[in-house]
Image (cartoon, helix red, strand yellow):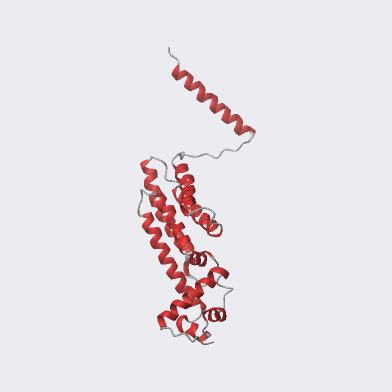
Amino acid sequence: MANTARMTALQRREQLIRVGRALFASKGFEAVSVEEIAANAKVSKPIVYEHFGGKEGLYAVIVDREMRELTNALIEALSDTKEHPRQALALLTYIEENSEGFQVLVRDSPTTDPAGSFNSLLGDISLRVEDLLTAAFKRRKLSAKGVPYYAQMLVGMTVFTGQYWADRPKVNKEQLAAYVVDLAWHGLSRLDSKPILRFESQKAKQLAAKEDKERRDKERSETTVP
């Protein structure tokens, strides 16, 4: 299938990348064939093989490009330790401006894909968030034992919320970032040094009542004038 439009090799390569990205975003890696890529680009199959060696090569180029763009955005945001909203907005801005690229990253990937690409990136980002939280916990004299878990929670919350928002953008990114920041940072500002999980069993209620009574008795004794 020949394309009568004349393109340079670079232009043809970019065209195939655009076509491949759209197909991988909508259908996933496994469901897309070289034939489909060629048909959508209005070229013959050999053209795809000539530029990328097959759909695996095309997919790798697309993922590498998207990963670099997303990584740069996140690293820049995480470098500013005073601007939490910027950190929340970085991923959402990428999703808004690169919806197809984001869908490629979070969809199925070939089994030959090294390190899981997107999951590997999230692991790296989690480590950077962990460093930021460790410093924050030390400033507040909190135990840093749970920091790795808090880092995973923050990254996971933002990523999964972003995925949900990508399909249901009923609020703008600033409003969504405000939701994320409100839950994450306002919650973190009131962390207990040694949090305890309480179950609403009868025993737990009795213990809570006892602790509450002891607290009130202590407050009364402290305010009683001898």
Q: Where is residue 171 in the image (x, y as percent from the top left)?
A: 52, 53
Q: Nearer the viewer, residue 174 or 105?
A: 174
Estimate the x, y position of residue 7 in percent, counting from the top left.
43, 83
Numbered marks: total: 0
Q: Which residue is drawn at 60% across and 29% down?
A: 206
Write the residue at 49% across / 85% down.
47
Q: Which of 191 and 88 is in front in this view?
A: 88
Whether residue 109 is visible, yes or no, is no
The residue positioned farthest toward the right in the image shown: 202
Residue at 47% in and 22% down: 219
Q: Quadrant of residue 91?
A: bottom left
Camera sees residue 58: yes
Left or right: residue 84 compared with residue 35:
left
Quarter of the rendering occupied by the N terminus: bottom right
Give the percent coordinates (x, y) of residue 117.
Answer: 47, 66
**Relative height, residue 49 to residue 110 (above, below):** below
